Image (cartoon, grey):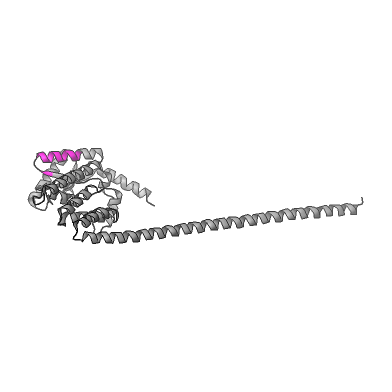
């Protein structure tokens, strides 16, 4: 074979090879393009499905809120009804229809002002089921438990609920604080001073709710109560809550404050800026409060 034939042979082979390579490249490019198109379609379908699911969820939530609003409106109307049975139903059902702080306010108002004994008793019982009852509702029910104008049944129910509320407040504290709270109550009563633990541990959610209330209830988004090492007491005489606004009432709180300090508690009445006479906390409460705030600051995005 001459040199020209060899060159021609190599050229023919090169054309065959190049044609094959080109076919392979074209096929590979085609597969890549098809794969990309398929992946794009799959991703687009996935995104559309997510968007549709999100829209469906929003629609469902909106419908639920509308239904809840309608139900709440009906229950509020029941509260204003002259029918005591409707009012009792409303007091119970509203627990699941309105925010917890709103419900606590409703129960407090009904417990204090409703003209029906049965409705008030229902409000007391509902208050006993509150997860984190505030001091206001406790004060109302303590007053009812000692109110001679109430029926024997109402006073008895009120006493049971008050004991339940106090036990719940103490049980929510850390063991060391709960033990000291019980001892303080015992020591005060031995001195003839009737006190009740009306507030104990407070969750961060409840603290946030208090922070957002209007008018302002607190300026603290994180309270020493959130540590479970602080509690508030109330002094009562014949069911009446003593605010500590008179000289005599102030002296009673000072006497209880001294009893608390004898037990090793810190008393809020010793505050230099604000004298919080019902308040007590363990000696390590402020350190734990600082640690809690630091942890929350580090975990909050």
What's the residue at 47%, 59% (across, down)?
A: 52
Q: Is residue 214 visible?
A: no
Q: Seen from this angle, which residue lies furthest right?
A: 2
The quadrant in which residue 266 appears is top left
Where residue 20 sits: x, y (%)? 76, 53
Where residue 58 sits: x, y (%)? 41, 59
Asked if residue 81 lies in the magenta stretch, the reply is no
Q: Is residue 74 left or right of residue 30?
A: left
Nearer to us in this view, 106 or 63: 63
Q: Is residue 185 visible?
A: yes
Q: Which region of the structure is painted magenta?
A: 180-194
What's the residue at 31%, 61% (across, down)?
A: 70
Nearer to us in this view, 128 or 101: 128
Where residue 202 sits: x, y (%)? 26, 47
Asked if residue 186 lies in the magenta stretch, the reply is yes
Q: Is residue 133 left or right of residue 249?
A: right
Nearer to us in this view, 239 or 222: 239
What's the residue at 10%, 38% (across, down)?
A: 190
Nearer to us in this view, 205 or 98: 98
Give the total of numbered labels. Answer: 0
Q: Main secondary structure of the magenta part?
A: helix
Where residue 32 sits: x, y (%)? 65, 55
What's the residue at 21%, 42% (across, down)?
A: 167
């Amino acid at each position: 074979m001459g040199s020209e034939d060899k060159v021609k042979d190599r050229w023919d082979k090169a054309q065959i090879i190049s044609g094959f390579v080109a076919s392979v490249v074209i096929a590979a490019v085609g597969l890549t393009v098809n794969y990309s198109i398929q992946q794009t379609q799959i991703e687009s379908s996935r995104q559309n499905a997510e968007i549709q699911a999100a829209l469906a969820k929003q629609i469902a939530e909106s419908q639920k809120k509308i239904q809840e609003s309608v139900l709440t409106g009906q229950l509020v109307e029941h509260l204003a009804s002259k029918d005591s049975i409707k009012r009792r139903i409303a007091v119970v059902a509203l627990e699941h229809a309105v925010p917890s702080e709103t419900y606590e306010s409703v129960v407090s108002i009904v417990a204090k002002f409703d003209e029906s004994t049965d409705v008030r008793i229902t409000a007391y019982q509902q208050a006993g089921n509150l997860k984190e009852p505030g001091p206001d509702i406790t004060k109302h029910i303590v007053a009812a438990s000692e109110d001679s104008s109430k029926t024997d049944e109402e006073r008895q129910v009120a006493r049971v609920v008050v004991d339940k509320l106090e036990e719940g407040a103490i049980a929510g504290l850390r063991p060391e604080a709960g033990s000291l709270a019980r001892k303080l109550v015992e020591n005060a009563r031995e001195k003839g001073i009737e006190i009740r633990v009306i507030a104990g541990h407070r969750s961060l959610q409840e603290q946030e709710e208090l922070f957002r209330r209007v008018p302002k209830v607190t300026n603290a988004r994180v309270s020493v109560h959130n540590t479970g090492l602080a509690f508030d007491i109330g002094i009562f005489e014949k069911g009446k809550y003593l605010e500590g606004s008179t000289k005599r009432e102030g002296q009673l709180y000072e006497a209880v404050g001294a009893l608390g300090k004898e037990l090793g508690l810190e008393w809020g009445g010793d505050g230099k800026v604000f004298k919080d006479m019902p308040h007590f906390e363990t000696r390590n409460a402020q350190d734990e409060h600082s640690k809690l705030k630091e942890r929350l600051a580090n975990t909050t995005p």
